[in-house]
Amino acid sequence: MLKNRTQNVNTICNTKGPFHQSPLVVVTQGTNPYQNTLTALKSLHLPNLKGKRILLKPNAGRLVPPKRGITTHPSVIAAAIDFFQQLKPAELFIGESPILGVKALDALKIAGITDIARERGVTLVDLDEKPPFILPIPEGKLLKKLRICAFIREVDFIVSLPVMKTHMHTGVSLSIKNMKGVLWKREKARLHQLEFQNQDEKLGKPLDVAVVDMIQVLRPHLAVIDGTVGMEGLGPSEGEPKEAQLIVASCDCLAADSVATYLMGFDPVSIPHLVLSYKRGIGEIDLQKMKILPEDFKKFRQSFLPPPQKISIQYPNVEVFDCNSCSACLSTTLLFLRRFLNQVPPCVFQEDKLIIGIGKELKSPPQGTILIGNCTAGHKKRGLYVPGCPPIASSILDRLKEEEKKNQKK
């Protein structure tokens, strides 16, 4: 059993230190993701990690096979394990807290991470397994406290290993946003449900401000951004894979995210949660104030398709009432339609149309609407309610087939 290391806020997050000013960011590019990752890590100046407990936090929150631009590439994980094991830590862990309805160990296995870890003797951790602890956010704008997966109090050093993605609500999803995966279960969804109380922080959306509140107390010690196969367009899970063959690494998570954003073809100052992070002293956003290796890193810049300004769901026999849904429920809806629309029983169609409602601001949906997600629970008498935050796509189909069976018995 691990020794319980009850830490204060300043030892959970990566506080300002020698890496905060003029941060070093390393970029590698090539066809070998293992070597790209190893080269980037060897180029950084890390603290002495001998005898420390290290958590590798990949992006593996969904049941998705590897190399689709959704989960961290197994070769990147392999390189990170091999690198850190050479530093003689006390123990190395890989942990995740996925979306609701998905078990962490299942997600890690399907992502191709389990075999890599077991071959190297690394412990896999379901971060939701233990009850959470409450972490205060003294300077939070929208969040004053968070429920955090208790396991992170057992470790000394956290490595955020996200995929290089666009995001339908926050522009990009990189090392900062990846830290949502240490929030306990439903706490992740709460960040999507907040509203502004005043105008002070309206540079972006409430989600942008909430992410920055979170990163004030949950800053990773190291960011290793996996752009081997990234995602463009309708990220973080419904976009198209983008083979960028890049790795971006830094001890300043904001600097890493800013460089990665630039290499994706975007201006970092156009991403609200990055700007807000800089204003709160999280790290550096100005590439001119960083040391970036190699010096000609700009040659690696690519053009990721941005997330669409307005998301429309193009199916002739489907009507979706999307009233301020979060990316999780919207992604689930898109995935359901893509995979299972042809299996939907005819009895749930209303005059040859499948009507779907999502989002916390849904008002008076038509009778017979398929209501997806906990935010629509107030309308369950008007249609077929599918609980979850979000529900998984297959559970929506299961609910519709249940309705079909009821109709057949009548």
Image (spheres, rainbow, N blue to C red):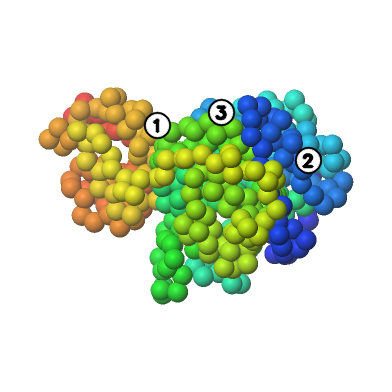
Q: Earlier in the sequence, mark 2 or mark 1?
A: 2
Residue 409 against residue 200 in the figure, above or below? above
Q: CA distance from mark 2 to mark 1?
A: 43 Å
Kindly identify which residue carries mark 2.
42
User: Mark 3: which secondary structure?
Assistant: loop
The residue closer to the viewer here, 397 or 172, is 172
Kindly identify which residue carries mark 1.
394
Kindly identify which residue carries mark 3.
66
> Residue 296: x and y, percent?
65, 43
Q: Earlier in the sequence, mark 3 or mark 1?
A: 3
User: What residue is drawn where x is 53% and y is 31%?
Assistant: 243
Q: In terms of image quadrants, where is residue 13?
A: bottom right
Circle 1 crowding by C-alpha within 10 Å: few under 14, some 14–19, many from 20: few
Name the mark nearer the viewer: 3 or 2. Answer: 2
User: What residue is drawn where x is 55% and y is 41%?
Assistant: 301
> Residue 407: x and y, percent?
21, 30
Checking the image for residue 249, the label placed there is: none
Q: Residue type at mark 1? A: Ser
Residue 351 against residue 23 in the figure, above or below? above
In the rendered structure, the answer to whether residue 182 lies left or right of residue 409 reads: right
Whether residue 313 is visible: yes
Q: Earlier in the sequence, mark 3 or mark 2?
A: 2
User: Which quadrant of the figure contains the C terminus?
Assistant: top left
User: What residue is drawn where x is 28% and y is 39%?
Assistant: 313
Residue 121 against residue 19 in the figure, above or below? above
Name the mark nearer the viewer: 3 or 1. Answer: 3
Circle 3 crowding by C-alpha within 10 Å: few under 14, some 14–19, many from 20: some
Q: Residue type at mark 2? A: Lys
In the rendered structure, the answer to whether residue 362 lies left or right of residue 50 reads: left
The residue closer to the viewer here, 363 or 379, is 363
Q: CA distance from mark 3 to mark 2?
A: 25 Å
Q: In terms of image quadrants, where is residue 37?
A: top right
